Image (cartoon, helix red, strand yellow):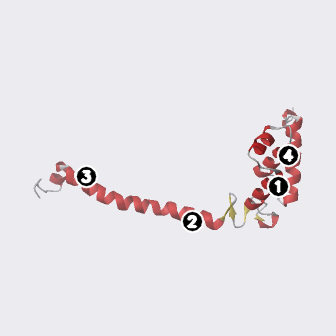
Amino acid sequence: MELRDQYTAAAQRAISCAVQYAKKSGSPMIGTEHLLYGLSQEKEGTAHVVLRAYQVDADTLDSLIRELIEPEKDFISRGTKQAGKTNGRPLEEGKKGRKQKAEQPDRISESAVPESKRQEDKNPESRMQEGKTPES
């Protein structure tokens, strides 16, 4: 039994819609955003009901998706890597996030030094190991 034979008729229609939407968008691949759009168009499906409950119609969803993806011209290397985009976010935004994460250890180590000094001052054993008397 083929995998597609295990899909309901509604799921098959949603996938077909996703394929058409991806082509229309100029995407060389079908992504989850295309599947979401296809599911939203299937009136018998739960995804359609949920999106409507949150007042997300086809035009709104299409606009949101277009903001997150770029047409085929931005894809490079057999369509698997995006130029200037990572996970739907601009590349610069990803660099900022990595820079902020890289700076966090500095902030942690800066606060750790005074904390370790404070702990040493509280612990007479560590002062004696350094050759200091409790009074010094």
Residue sitting nearer the eye, 132 or 59: 59
Cα–Cα span, label 1 and label 4: 11 Å
- Disc 4: CA contacts within 10 A as few (<14), some (14-19) or many (>=20): many
- Given contact means CB atoms under 8 Å apart, are the residues at marks 4 and 2 in contact? no
Q: Amino acid at mark 3?
A: Gln
Q: Earlier in the sequence, mark 1 or mark 4?
A: 4
Cα–Cα span, label 3 and label 2: 35 Å
Cα–Cα span, label 4 and label 2: 36 Å
How many numbered tags mark residues here?
Answer: 4
Residue 59 has which mark? 1
Residue under label 3, please give it: 119
Image check: 121 left or right of 74? left
Q: Amino acid at mark 4?
A: Gln
- Given contact means CB atoms under 8 Å apart, are the residues at marks 3 and 1 in contact? no
Q: Earlier in the sequence, mark 3 or mark 2?
A: 2
Residue sitting nearer the eye, 94 or 55: 55
Residue under label 2, please give it: 96
Mark 4 or 3: the one toward you: 4
